[in-house]
Amino acid sequence: MAILAFDFGGSAVKYGVWNGQEMTDKGKFTTPKTWEEMKASLLAVFLGMEQEFEGVAFSAPGVVDVEKQMINGISAIPYIHRFNIFKELEELFNLPVAIENDANCAGMAEIYEGAAKGKKEVAFVVVGTGIGGAIFHNGQIAKGAHLYGGEFGLMYLSEGETFSKLGTAVQMAWSYCERKGVEKETFTGEDVFRLAENGDELAKEEVNLFYEYLTQGLFSIQFSLDPEMIVLGGGVSAKEGLLDEINRRMKEKLAHFELNDFIPQIVTCKYENDANLIGAAANFITIQKNNE
């Protein structure tokens, strides 16, 4: 039977139907301003589908505490936090509900049907404005004792700065703008990459630092968690030549530390736009199987 999946985003809520093979009947609506409006919008989608579902799956921002049935932390949707959201949604649909953090869902999509299919030990690293991710141990999400597992962006890299501050193309662009003395939105990461390719010396410096810090962070993740595979997600994962440059620098670091047992397997994600929806459905399926 099908699963209805929703992905809570700060500006839009995406939805779709997982039929066991693909995500169909996809759509989205603007993120409502209140919880009551959100519930009304969710129910309207549910009733509009005119079919039976096994359950409803959600991808959401924040720290999802399954035991306490709530979402902690902070996000761009403040009204979904710190109450029993599981219970309210189950009552709304009169169906089983599963909720998981959005980065964990994106990672689950790669484990379930994506780049890491068949792998058991995986680190999923999302590189956007900041850096997030998910850890998978024995094929299951490993959240850690305080539910902060996979918050790779909080790792210290250099002079008190974090991985999120140093290892993203967005931050690279902001640094370039600051050094140029212009507004930080003047140039994007794509602009800086292009400027570097055209010989701009300052852009070349910033691109070099971006790759160096990104590789340093991935090196630390590899030798802290020892995953079979690191999967990179986020917009920058689609950049041509990204993996070649990371792998070149990774090999240099391995040689420097005389680590020659293996070469870390780093790949880019298979899913982009539908990753959170597919992962939410995969999470629901996993929970139902574990409860059998």
Image: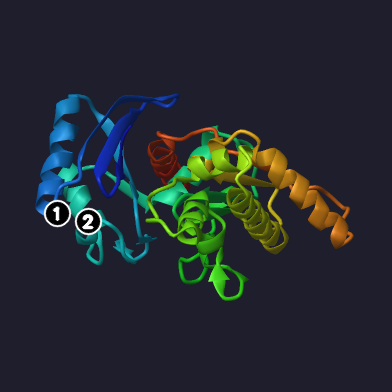
Name the residue type under label 2: Lys
Q: Which residue is mark 1?
A: 35
- Measuring 51% from the left and 63% from the top, which residue is drawn there? 165
**Tag 2's secondary structure?**
helix
- Res 111 visible: no
Q: Quadrant of residue 54?
A: top left
The answer to whether the residues at label 2 and label 1 have Cβ atoms under 8 Å apart is: no
**Tag 1's secondary structure?**
helix
Q: Position of residue 291 (x, y in %)?
A: 43, 48
- Measuring 67% from the left and 56% from the top, which residue is drawn there? 212
User: Crowdedness of circle 2 by 10 Å Cα count: few (<14), some, many (20+)?
Assistant: some
| Horizontal arrangement in the rendering, residue 239 relative to residue 254 (left or right) | left
| Horizontal arrangement in the rendering, residue 212 relative to residue 97 (left or right) | right
**Quarter of the image with the N terminus in it:** top left
- Res 214 visible: yes
- Measuring 53% from the left and 45% from the top, which residue is drawn there? 192
Q: CA separation, marks 2 and 1? A: 14 Å
Q: Position of residue 266 (x, y in %)?
A: 68, 44
Q: Position of residue 268 (x, y in %)?
A: 60, 38
Q: Which residue is mark 2?
A: 87
- Measured along the vertical axis of the image, is residue 76 above or below residue 111? below
Q: Position of residue 286 (x, y in %)?
A: 46, 44
- Measured along the vertical axis of the image, is residue 112 above or below residue 52? below
Frontmost of labels 2 and 1 is 1
Q: Quadrant of residue 248?
A: top right
The residue nearer to you, when weighing 62 against 281, is 62
